[in-house]
Image (cartoon, coloured by chain):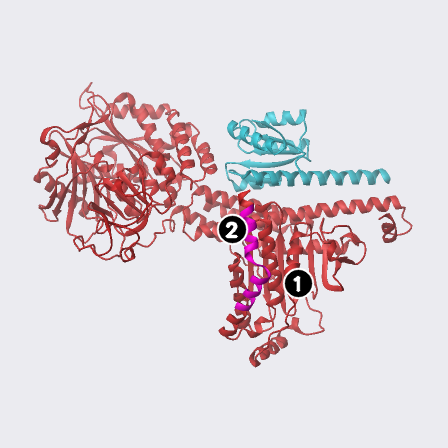
Chain colours: A cyan, B red
């Protein structure tokens, strides 16, 4: 299950480039940007299924970016990935609807599993909505 | 299909809507199953992280605050997810858990993120305003120099200190700390190469940082005041004086940089260099090994007028490897004392009596081919000694005696043995450059007897001096270049030419250290004593020891033998637990008390409530129990035949029921039964193979007492009364999907639950097993769980036993490994029932243990699994 689109957001250029390359090798449709603002712009242009989002970013930070993504596209699943382990930010992120909060360094397989699980959740939610719409139409 | 739905739902309903509702229900089930799976996955991660925390608290390996923070945050994140998922599975039922979660998290916070004390005060303090009471502003090194200058009346160079407030100002001005913390979080401190890159990066960041203008102005101002007269040119020595060095037993020897003979133009650069050395490899790995928090270390910097030393060195007011000896040790070399402290050269060595005017008892004058001196303008260099100088003593007897008297005086003043760095100027004045408590090596071995004849074994080398006591054996590893450090094997004997401080990061992994040059007063010797690593310094031709060959180092008698000599190794010091009691350790211990203990043990107890959760572990336990129940309940409440439990069909219907959560059946089953051949659940099939591998022989023959015990229990335990509806189901339930299986079973008086996730995601795989109850008295039941626990431990399970309840876990292994262990569990569930009755005497316990182990080996041989794992690894 790798046929879904992913956007990576991280201001650490080396980390971002390496991760995009490694995930692309695993047949993932993946793009990377370096700030919250460019992430929001990218999502407007091309919607994706899963966003992997660094918490500490220049400009609007990861938590704020998450808040805005969830406002405009609540079905997109967001995984927070951070080098600053922080319990309060983790809980805030989860409360805002993040799928998970991972701490660097993260094993690439673990990250891939998380993205697959996040995509699965999105697919189920979309299916639920389709069912509800069908039911409403039928009624 | 459609026909079925028409039958199941009301006949009046149009078929299209039937199918639609069924489809919606199927999606609802899928959604719930997915949430349940996320809860299980978070539960598994939380338990694994708790196991990590417990392992760290055993104190056998070092860990950092980054470890503490990441583990606490990970547990917290996972527990919060669990709370979110259970509230999705059962809306409104468990909202109290959010409050419990927040309260526990608030209590953990201060352990992991302690409040920082305000960092105010002067940025720079002149030496004449410094004494011991200022240690929290200028660091203990500068505070001691101030104390000696202003309270004891000793001669020290004039100078000033850039304070801790100055340091925090510098770091804050450049916003360095968050970025440094992030990099530390992302690196693995166990890998020296990663640590090396990390250290280099951070130091570079600090070197590129700007000195805040006000700090720069004050440094320049205080520097100007050091001139004896207007327009004098002079140079200074800049030395680290870190805060947070007051940890008991920690020496912090030689970790940070000193910059000698610095001219006025380069003061700011030297300041950055010394601040950067807080993140030098030696310092980072030392703090890691000793459990010291980075944020407790503020790098204060002392700036003292440079003394152009004729000779310099170190005086110890005691012998660090034997405090009982009534002697003072003085080590001395030509030029600056740095070469003695660094362990690069062999200094002259004087042993003096502890008299009011100390007498020389022993004198060893070393060959000193070089000396370290100041360049005229700036910097230092090594010069060849000329003529007789190399063989002449670098101290007169009078100077040696004066230094020994000084050492005794300082020991008396501070009430502790002292380690003193000194220099003698061109005007033959003695300057004290540093003074700190001398660490005694805690060691209860036999007394060294250097001249004892050699009967222990084949001697390879002897000579040199004991720098740290003890004995050890290991393979020889000769390190010549920096890069050799990366390949240093754990437990090897480190052999080096010079006893330089740069080798200190290897000491936490070395069995012993041997060097050709250097002395017991150098930094490396200090660290060796602190870490309890036996060390001999000054062994001629040590680097000629055969690489990779095992040798035994007897540091007490300065001898090295070929092979392992057990009679020498008796004298091995016990491994030191450097973490216990350290700030990092205490931070984790404090947090762990709110994370790890499990108070909610019995799901049937009235106290098994959300409000009663006192730790994160309680929350996970509570939620897991309730989640499994919710999954059952949902299947039961929605009369949806596809998702109601089915009776398992072998050749005949059996007393086993299966609930398919998602993709556990080959095809959806409409009727009340499911044939075994339709089951696709990997973990269930493995478990089932174990359950059915051999027929149960029935209850073992019971002695009279065992039967009495059962009868007695039956009268007191209502659950055992036949025909009475008890709170326990008498059926065995499987809840399955293709990769998941949960079994709750009751066999007679025994309750067992198995939960397993087995898929190609090796890292997520786990088996959890719980086992409780029995008919016999508590004693026999205890013996039985210990009996089962011992077998499970042999198979790699982590076993915990509380009273008569056993829980066992296994994680992160490949599919074939997990399947094998599930077969073992299946077998044990069937064949250990009622064994509690025969648990009266040790002989029958061991009889049954052997019997069961023989059967397990026969039915599920390990070889097959082992070869599979090997072939998988070689692919």
Please name the residue shown 74% across and 48% down the image.
B29
Of badges 1 and 2, the one in the foreground is: 1
Q: Total number of numbered labels?
A: 2
- Residue B223 falls left or right of residue B816: left
Host chain of mark 1? B
Q: Nearer the viewer, residue B144 or B329?
A: B329
Q: Which numbered tag is attached to residue B50?
A: 2
Q: Quadrant of residue B542?
A: top left
- Disc 1: CA contacts within 10 A as few (<14), some (14-19) or many (>=20): few
Q: Label 1, label 2: how many angstroms apart (C-alpha)?
A: 35 Å
- Disc 2: CA contacts within 10 A as few (<14), some (14-19) or many (>=20): many
The residue to which callout 1 is attached is B692
Q: Position of residue B316 (x, y in %)?
A: 19, 44
Vertical relation: B216 (above or below) A118? above
Circle 2 SS class: helix
Please name the residue shown 43% across and 36% down the image.
B194
Circle 1 SS class: helix
Report the magenta residues as a range: B850-871
Q: Position of residue B763 (x, y in %)?
A: 57, 46
Q: Position of residue B339 (x, y in %)?
A: 22, 34
Viewer can see residue B424: no
Q: Nearer the viewer, residue A30 or B805?
A: A30
Host chain of mark 2? B
Q: Pick whichever of labels 1 and 2 is earlier in the sequence.
A: 2
Please name the residue shown 51% across and 53% down the image.
B596
Viewer can see residue B67: yes
């Amino acid at each position: 299950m790798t046929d879904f689109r992913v956007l990576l957001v991280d201001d650490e250029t080396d980390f971002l480039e390496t991760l995009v390359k490694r995930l692309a090798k695993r047949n993932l449709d993946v793009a990377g940007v370096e700030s919250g603002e460019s992430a929001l712009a990218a999502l407007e242009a091309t919607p994706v299924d899963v966003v992997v989002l660094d918490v500490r970013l220049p400009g609007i930070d990861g938590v704020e970016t998450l808040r805005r993504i969830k406002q405009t596209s609540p079905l997109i699943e967001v995984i927070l990935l951070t080098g600053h382990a922080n319990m309060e930010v983790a809980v805030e992120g989860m409360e805002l609807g993040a799928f998970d909060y991972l701490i660097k360094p993260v094993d690439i397989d673990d990250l891939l599993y998380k993205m697959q699980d996040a995509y699965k959740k999105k697919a189920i939610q979309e299916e639920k909505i389709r069912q509800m719409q069908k039911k409403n139409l039928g009624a | 299909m459609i026909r079925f739905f028409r039958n199941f739902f009301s006949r009046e309903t149009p078929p299209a809507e039937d199918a639609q509702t069924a489809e919606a229900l199927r999606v609802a089930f899928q959604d719930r199953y997915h949430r349940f799976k996320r809860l299980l996955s978070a539960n598994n991660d939380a338990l694994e992280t708790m196991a990590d925390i417990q392992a760290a608290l055993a104190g056998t390996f070092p860990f950092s605050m980054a470890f503490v923070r990441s583990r606490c945050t990970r547990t917290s994140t996972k527990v919060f997810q669990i709370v979110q998922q259970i509230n999705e599975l059962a809306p409104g039922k468990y909202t109290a858990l959010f409050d419990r979660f927040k309260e526990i998290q608030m209590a953990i916070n201060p352990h992991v993120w302690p409040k920082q004390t305000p960092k105010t005060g002067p940025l720079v303090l002149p030496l004449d305003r410094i004494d011991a009471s200022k240690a929290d502003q200028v660091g203990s090194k500068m505070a001691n120099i101030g104390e000696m200058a202003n309270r004891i009346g000793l001669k020290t160079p004039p100078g000033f200190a850039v304070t801790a407030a100055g340091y925090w100002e510098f770091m804050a001005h450049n916003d360095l700390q968050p970025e440094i913390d992030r990099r530390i979080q992302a690196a693995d401190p166990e890998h020296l190469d990663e640590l090396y890159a990390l250290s280099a990066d951070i130091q570079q960041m600090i070197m590129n940082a700007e000195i805040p203008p006000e700090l720069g102005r004050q440094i320049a101002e205080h520097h100007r005041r050091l001139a004896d007269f207007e327009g004098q040119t002079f140079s200074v020595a800049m030395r680290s004086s870190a805060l947070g060095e007051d940890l008991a037993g920690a020496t912090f020897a030689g970790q940070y940089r000193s910059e000698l003979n610095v001219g006025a133009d380069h003061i700011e650069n030297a300041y950055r260099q010394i601040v950067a050395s807080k993140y030098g490899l030696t310092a980072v790995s030392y703090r890691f090994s000793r459990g010291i928090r980075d944020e407790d270390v503020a790098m204060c910097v002392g700036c003292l007028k440079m003394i152009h030393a004729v000779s310099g060195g170190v005086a110890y007011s005691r012998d660090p490897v034997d405090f009982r000896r009534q002697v003072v040790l003085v080590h001395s070399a030509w030029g600056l004392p740095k070469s003695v402290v660094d362990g690069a050269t062999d200094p002259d060595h004087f042993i003096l009596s502890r008299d009011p005017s100390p007498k020389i008892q022993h004198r060893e004058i070393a060959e000193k081919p070089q000396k370290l001196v100041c360049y005229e303008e700036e910097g230092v260099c090594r010069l060849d000694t000329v003529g007789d100088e190399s063989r002449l003593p670098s101290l007169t007897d009078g100077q040696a005696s004066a230094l020994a008297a000084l050492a005794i005086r300082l020991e008396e003043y501070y009430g502790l043995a002292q380690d003193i760095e000194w220099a003698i100027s061109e005007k033959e004045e003695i300057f004290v450059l540093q003074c700190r408590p001398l660490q005694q090596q805690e060691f209860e071995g036999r007394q060294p007897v250097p001249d004892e004849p050699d009967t222990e074994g084949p001697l390879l080398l002897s000579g040199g001096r004991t720098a740290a006591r003890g004995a050890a054996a290991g393979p020889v590893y000769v390190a010549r270049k920096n890069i050799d450090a990366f390949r240093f094997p754990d437990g090897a004997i480190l052999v080096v030419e010079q006893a330089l401080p740069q080798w200190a990061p290897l000491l936490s992994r070395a069995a012993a250290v041997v060097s050709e040059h250097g002395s017991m007063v150098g930094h490396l010797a200090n660290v060796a004593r602190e870490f309890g690593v036996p060390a001999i310094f000054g062994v001629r031709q040590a680097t000629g020891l055969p690489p990779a060959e095992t040798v035994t180092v007897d540091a007490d008698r300065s001898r090295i033998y070929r092979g392992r000599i057990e009679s020498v190794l008796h004298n091995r010091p016990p491994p030191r637990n450097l973490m216990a009691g350290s700030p990092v350790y205490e931070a984790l211990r404090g947090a762990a008390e709110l994370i790890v203990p499990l108070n909610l043990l019995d799901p049937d107890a009235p106290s098994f409530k959300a409000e009663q959760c006192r730790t994160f572990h309680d929350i996970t336990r509570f939620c897991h129990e309730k989640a499994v129940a919710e999954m059952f309940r949902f299947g039961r409440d929605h009369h949806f035949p596809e998702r109601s439990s089915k009776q398992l069909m072998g050749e005949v219907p059996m007393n086993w029921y299966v609930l398919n959560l998602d993709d556990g059946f080959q095809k959806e089953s409409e009727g009340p039964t499911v044939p075994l051949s339709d089951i696709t659940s990997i973990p269930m099939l493995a478990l089932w193979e174990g359950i059915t591998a051999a027929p149960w022989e029935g209850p073992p023959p019971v002695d009279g007492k065992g039967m009495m015990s059962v009868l007695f229990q039956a009268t007191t335990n209502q659950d055992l009364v036949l025909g009475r509806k008890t709170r326990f189901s008498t059926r065995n339930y499987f809840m399955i999907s293709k990769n998941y299986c949960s079994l709750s079973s009751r066999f007679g008086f025994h309750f067992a639950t198995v939960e397993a996730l087995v898929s190609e995601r090796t890292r997520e795989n786990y088996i959890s097993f719980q086992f409780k109850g029995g008919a016999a008295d508590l004693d026999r039941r205890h013996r039985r769980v210990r009996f089962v626990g011992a077998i499970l431990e042999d198979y790699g399970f982590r076993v915990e036993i509380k009273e008569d309840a056993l829980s066992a876990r296994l994680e992160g292994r490949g599919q074939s490994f997990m399947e094998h262990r599930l077969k073992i569990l299946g077998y044990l569930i069937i064949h250990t029932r009622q064994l509690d009755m025969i648990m009266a005497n040790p002989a029958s316990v061991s009889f049954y243990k052997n019997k069961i182990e023989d059967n397990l080996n026969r039915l599920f041989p390990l070889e097959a699994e082992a070869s599979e794992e090997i072939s998988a690894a070689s692919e």
